[in-house]
Image (cartoon, rainbow, N blue to C red):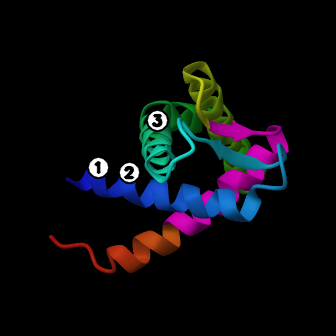
Amino acid sequence: MNFLVRVLIGAVALWFTTLLVGGNGDHGVWIQPMTETTQGHVFTLLIVAFVFGIINSILGPIVRFVSIPLYIITLGLFGLIINGALMLLTAGISNLMGFGLRVDGFWWGVLGALVLSVITAVISAVVRPGKRR
């Protein structure tokens, strides 16, 4: 149940991210839906949020552990680079499916990851203000 809530939060945050960082046309970060219907957009957002959650939960800790020295040297700013790379990986995987997340370049991925993490934190604070024990 907790994973489902996190995927829904991620989908909403991804939608807001594409609204803020998605430029005109093929610039920035945008979603290419399965179909041009509302259901196609929502389903695509849910699939991309699920894939991003899986990549971030499996590959993210490994990459973050290996790059601990770079985190120390850059005082944690290297985390933005890692999150951008994970977003690009998600875009690459969804590109294989023929729909999903599209990122114009590496720095658009870094900016999209930064905006996505801020929006996810805000939504998570609103939806789950206090953790139950």
Q: Which mark is residue 7?
A: 2
Numbered-mark total: 3
Q: Position of residue 38 (x, y in %)?
A: 49, 53
For the residue pair 79 and 3, the one nearer the viewer reads as 3
Tags 2 and 1 touching, CB below 8 Å: yes
Q: Position of residue 44 (x, y in %)?
A: 49, 42
Q: Position of residue 114 (x, y in %)?
A: 68, 58
User: What amino acid is labelled 3 in the image?
Assistant: Val
Give the mark, 2 or 3, whose residue is nearer the N terminus.
Answer: 2
The residue drawn where x is 51% and y is 48% is 37
Does residue 69 show up? no
User: Is-magenta flag for residue 108?
Assistant: yes
Report the magenta residues as a range: 101-120
The residue drawn where x is 29% and y is 49% is 3
User: What amino acid is labelled 2 in the image?
Assistant: Val
Give the mark, 1 or 3, whose residue is nearer the N terminus.
Answer: 1
Instruction: Say whether residue 101 is left or right of residue 129.
Output: right
Quadrant of res 109: top right
Q: Which residue is mark 3?
A: 51
Task: Give SS at disc 2.
Answer: helix
Q: Which residue is mark 1?
A: 3
Tags 2 and 3 touching, CB below 8 Å: no
